[in-house]
Amino acid sequence: MRLGVLDIGSNTVHMLVVDAHYGARPAPAADDRTVVRLMRYLDDDNMVTKDGVIALREAVKRAMLFAERFGAGEVIGMATSALREAANGPEVLRELEEIAGLKFQVLSGKEEANLTFLAARRWHGWAAGRLLVLDIGGGSFEVAYGVDENPEFSASVPLGAGRLTRHYLKHDPPLEDEVSVMKAHIKDEMKPLAEALKQLPTPDHVVATSKTFRSLARLAGQLVAVVGPTERRRMSRSDLEDWVGRLAQMPAAARTALPGITPERTYQIVAGAEVAVRAMKSFKISKLEICPWAMREGAILNYLEGQRDA
C-alpha cells in the first residue's frame, strides 16, 4: 500500500509518503515539510496564537495535497509535544482534523520514545543487543532502552531544542548568562534519567535519531562505511564538545554556513547541542551512531502490525 504519515511536530509539519506492507521495509516514495516552528506561536498563556493556527492550517492543506499528488491511499496523522501541551491544543487539532479529513493521534512523550525505539531496533536489528536510543525534538527529549522491540525503560522530558530556545535564549547570539542558566536547567532535568539508566545493564549500542542529532553529526561526526546508499555517521562526545561553545558565539545567520546546519535549525541548534552533550555526559556515552529511522518510521511499523492483527 502507499501510505502517508502526517506528523505535526514542534518545528515542522511533515508528510512522508511510503510504499509499505507488513514484513517489508517501508520504502520512501516522497516527502514534504513546512517549517512552522510552532513554539514561536505560543503566547504567555501557552495558547497557539491566531497566526500560529493559520500557519498550521496552511501547512496541513499543503501536506494533504502532497499526499494526494503522490497517490497515498491512506494517511495516518500524529501530533506531538507542542500541540499536546498547548492550552488550546484540542480545539486547534479539531480544526486541523476537519481540514485533513482524518483523526490525529496525540502521542504522549512515552509513546514518542517507544515508537522511536521500535524504529531503531528494526533498523539496527537484534545483533545490536541492548540498545539505548536518544532523540531531541522541538519540544521534548526522549530516551529509551531495551533488548526487545518494546523498551524496558522509556521517558520523555521537556528539553526540546525549540522549547529551550524560546524560554532561555533571548538574544542572537545568546548571552553567556542565558546559556549558563539553560545548561543548569538541562543538567537538573537529566539527573533522574541518568539515575534510572544507571540501574540497567550497560547498553551494547547507543544510537540517536532525528534532525537535531543528524545536523550535529554532520557538523561534528564522521562518516561510517556501511553497505547501501544511506549515509551513516558516528559522533564522539569530545568532537561535539569542541563545537558547542563555538555555536553559541555565532549569530544564527552565520551558522548556516556550517555543514549540516539548515536555516530551519539554525536558531535552535545551540540548545540542541547543549542537550546532546549533556545527555552524553550524564549517561556516560563517549560515542553514538546516528540512526536514519525515527518516530515516523516507528509509527508506520506499528500501524502495519495493527493492520495485520485486525
Image: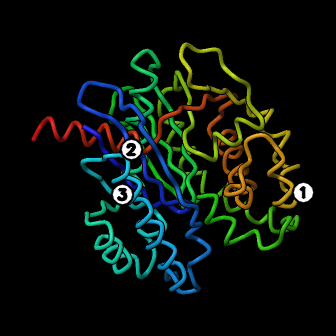
Q: Secondary structure at mark 2?
A: strand
| Relative image position of residue 299 (x, y in whole percent) | 34, 44
- Name the residue located 25 percent from the left edge and 24 percent from the top edge: 23
Q: Amino acid at mark 3?
A: Met
Q: CA distance from mark 1 to mark 3?
A: 36 Å
Q: Name the N-terminal-most of marks 1 and 2.
A: 2
Q: Secondary structure at mark 3?
A: strand
Q: CA distance from mark 1 to mark 2?
A: 38 Å
| Relative image position of residue 166 (x, y in whole percent) | 67, 71
Q: Which mark is residue 249?
A: 1
Please identify the quarter of the rendering in which residue 161 is found: bottom right
Circle 2 residue: 17
Q: Amino acid at mark 2?
A: Val
| Image coloring type | rainbow
Density class for disc 1 (Cα within 10 Å; few <14, some 14-19, many ≥20) is some
Q: Secondary structure at mark 1?
A: helix
Would residue 248 appear left or right of 104 to someone viewing this image?
Answer: right
Circle 3 residue: 78
Would residue 282 appear left or right of 73 to someone viewing this image?
Answer: right
- Name the residue located 37 percent from the left edge and 60 percent from the top edge: 64
Please identify the quarter of the rendering in which residue 298 is found: top left
Of 5 and 303, nearer the camera is: 5
